[in-house]
Image (cartoon, rainbow, N blue to C red):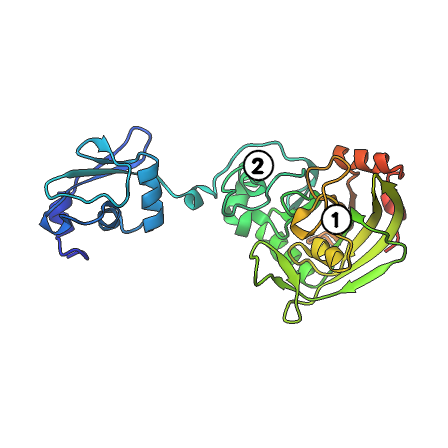
Amino acid sequence: MDQLGIDLGTVLGNEEAEAEDGVECRRAEAGPAWHGQRLDRCLVEMASEFSRNHLQSLIERGCVRVNGQAASSASRKVQAGQQIEIDLQPTAESRAFRAEPMELNIVLEDEHLLVLNKPAGMVVHPAAGNWSGTIMNGLLAHHAGAATLPRGGIVHRLDKDTSGLMVVGKTLEAVTALTRMIAAREVHREYLALAHGRVLAPLEIDAPLKRDPVSRVKMAVLATGKPSRTDVFPLGTESWETRVISAVHCVLHSGRTHQIRVHMASRGHPLVSDPLYGGVLALGLARQALHAARLSLAHPISGAPLVFEAPLPADLQAAWATLGLPEPRLGELAG
């Protein structure tokens, strides 16, 4: 018996069909116990494997019909004898781990790993609001082995609007080794950024980070957070309109979410065009002025030293030029 006191096997009559696009269409005739109940509550009884929120979204998308007419309200009352149909579209989450052919900017690839130069605006791993079009979807299409690996082989991430280098494992052996190397701080990551204010001397920012208790989309410096350290080296300071902007070279000693963005803001130097942490839009940039420019590590299998560099992308090149600063020579940077 179901929660409403009905033998669903009788009500459904085992009537299930496949829609033309392969989506299951489930049907039921409302019995006496459903009379006067909300439509969405009845749908939960018809398809208990889905959440109520997802079933409500199917109503909004026109996937639910009562007596052949599309239902428009989750709260409408069901009457005994009505025929209810629902096209059980999969959740966005269930579609996330699908192969999507896309162009990946591959800097190096062998049988065990690949190094990508990620463009700004691309999400690395599927999450709420970005269930498709991610780096992971592209990896699943790029090589068959990705489907057998945790997160498709992704061992570290870049923020959506941060550009630059990231390493990905292609075998379980490589993924395991890379994960251990990152935890041991044996994968060295260096960034170029533009920040508000004058940065005239090196900064060693050692400040623990944790999810902001007020705004869950942000991170914050909190005593109870995880240890986090960023070394910052000044590359030049120039004026732009009424603002002073500094170019900096940042070296990570840990890899926390939003680490450079939060650390710089905590010292009064939010990144240019990073409004989440107080950075003002400037220099025509539509995203935070942050680029993963240099990546160095030992090959996870052979142990051979690997060093990769990614020049500034076009938008940051233009911003550097507007400030009158020469583009950094990555191999000559301090740190």
| The quarter of the displayed image where residue 324 is located | top right
Horizontally, is 240 left or right of 290 in the view? right
The image position of residue 168, as x and y in percent, is 64, 47
> Mark 1, residues whose alpha carbon is within 10 Å: few (<14), some, or many (≥20)?
many
Given the image, on which type of amino acid does mark 1 rest?
Leu
Please report whichever mark, 2 or 1, sits nearer to the chain's N-terminal start: 2
The residue lying at 80 percent from left, 33 percent from top is 318
The residue lying at 32 percent from left, 33 percent from top is 22
The image position of residue 78, as x and y in percent, is 17, 44
Outermost residue to the front = 242
Q: Is residue 313 visible to us here?
A: no
In the depicted structure, whether residue 147 falls above or below residue 297: above
How far apart are the two marked residues, 2 and 1, measured between alpha carbons?
Answer: 34 Å
Q: Is residue 210 visible to us here?
A: yes
Quarter placement of the N terminus: bottom left
Q: Give the secondary structure at mark 1.
A: loop
Residue indicated by mark 2: 142
Horizontally, is 210 left or right of 133 in the view? right
Q: Give the secondary structure at mark 2.
A: helix
| The quarter of the displayed image where residue 5 is located | bottom left
Given the image, on which type of amino acid does mark 2 rest?
His
Q: Residue 239 carries which label?
A: none
> Mark 2, residues whose alpha carbon is within 10 Å: few (<14), some, or many (≥20)?
some
Horizontally, is 40 left or right of 145 in the view? left
Nearer to us: label 2 or label 1: 1
The residue lying at 59 percent from left, 41 percent from top is 135
The image position of residue 127, as x and y in percent, is 51, 47
Horizontally, is 296 left or right of 141 in the view? right
Residue indicated by mark 1: 271
In the depicted structure, whether residue 210 falls above or below residue 149: below
The residue lying at 87 percent from left, 42 percent from top is 239
Quarter placement of the C terminus: bottom right
